[in-house]
Amino acid sequence: MLAEWEKLAREATAKNEPYEGYLLRLTEAEVTTRSANALAARIRNACFPVVKDFDTFDFTAIPSLSKQKVLELSRGEWVEQHYNCCLIGNAGTGKTHVATALGQAICRLGKRVKFVTAAGMVTQLEEAQQQHRLDRLLSQLERLDLLIIDELGYLSFSRGGAELLFQVFAERYERRSVLVTSNLAFSEWGSVFQGDRMTAALLDRLTHRCHIFEMNGESYRFRESMTDKKEKAPKKAK
Ligand code: ADP
Ligand code: MG
C-alpha cells in the first residue's frame, strides 16, 4: 500500500473515481502482493533442489506415466484427504522433476510442503536425536501438509536411522501426506529398511491410500546426452 497509494491516488483523482473505488484498488494491490510473497516463502521453505515445473516436462518421453492422472494430483485433493503418492522407477526417468512440480502445485494451493532426500531426512532425524530435539523436529514435520522424500533406496540406513524414518511415516499415516520417489520396487525395500517386519509395516501404511506411478523407462538424461552427441557430430566432421 505504501508503494502504490500515491500513484493510485493520482489515477483516481484524474478519473474522478470515488473514494471507495480507490480504497478497493489499493487494498487489492496489497492482497495480491501479500499472497505472492506468501507463495514465494512457501516455495522457499519447501527447499526444492531445483525449480522445475510441468511446463518443461515432456510426458511423451515416458508413456507409462499418465499425464491426466499426474495433472489431476496437482489439484491437491489427495493432500486434503491425506493420501500418499509413490513414484517408482529407474534413474533419470523424471521422478524428481515430477515430485518437484507436484510439490510446487501443492504450495500454490496454500499448503506447507517440504522436499528432502531420504538420506537427508535420516541425517536430520539422527542429529536431532543426538541433540535431544527429536520431538521438536517431529512436530515440525507433523505440521507439513506434504512431505516429499526423494531417492529412497540409493543409500541404506543404519537400524536406528531406518527406525526413525519409519516413525515419521507411521505418524503421518492417515493424517498427513507423503510423496516418496524410489528406484526400488516395493519388493526390494527390505534392503533399505533392514528387517522384513518393519518393511512390511511401513509399506502397509504407505500404500494403503496411495497413488502409485511406475516410471520405468529409458533415462531422459542418457537420451538427452545421446541426442546432444548426434547433433554435435556433423559439426565436428566439417
Ligand atoms: P530421476 O529423479 O528419476 O532420476 P530426474 O527427475 O532427476 O530423474 O530427471 C533427470 C533429468 O532429466 C532432469 O534434468 C529432468 O528435468 C529431466 N527429465 C527427465 N524426464 C523428463 C521429461 N519427461 N521431460 C523433460 N525433462 C525430463
Ligand atoms: Mg531423482
Image (tube, grey):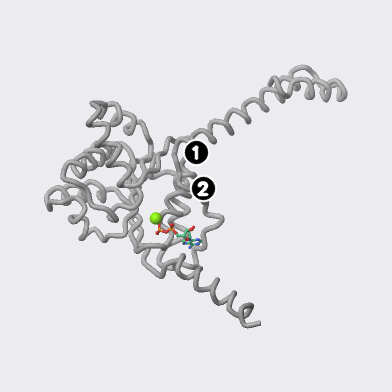
Which residue appears farthest toward the bottom when viewing the image?
A: 237
Badge 2: how crowded within 10 Å, few (<14), some, or many (20+)? Answer: few
Q: Kindly state the secondary structure of the residue where label 2 is placed.
A: loop
Residue for point 46% across, 42% down: 106
Residue for point 43% across, 56% down: 69
Query: Of the residues shown, which amino acid type is indicated by label 2?
Result: Val
Q: Which mark is residue 51?
A: 2
Which residue appears farthest toward the right when viewing the image?
A: 14
Measuring from the top left, give residue 29's x and y in whole percent.
68, 27
Residue marked by disc 1: 43
Query: Of the residues shown, which amino acid type is indicated by label 1?
Result: Ile
- Whether residue 61 sits left or right of residue 200 in the image: it is right
Q: Kindly state the secondary structure of the residue where label 1 is placed.
A: helix
Q: Which of the pair 31/21 is nearer the observer? A: 31
Measuring from the top left, give residue 18's x and y in whole percent.
80, 19
Q: Which of the pair 36/70 is nearer the observer? A: 36
- Whether residue 24 sits left or right of residue 66 in the image: it is right
- Whether residue 4 sits left or right of residue 190 in the image: it is right
CB contact under 8 Å: marks 2 and 1: yes
Badge 1: how crowded within 10 Å, few (<14), some, or many (20+)? Answer: many
Residue for point 66% across, 27% down: 28
Question: Quick check: 45 above or below 199?
Answer: above
State how far apart marks 2 and 1 are (Cα).
Answer: 9 Å
Measuring from the top left, give residue 74's x and y in whole percent.
47, 48
Q: Which mark is residue 103?
A: none
Residue for point 36% across, 58% down: 213
Count every numbered label the image shows and give the total.
2
Measuring from the top left, give residue 223's x and y in whole percent.
47, 70
Q: Earlier in the sequence, mark 2 or mark 1?
A: 1
Question: Quick check: 226 above or below 106?
Answer: below
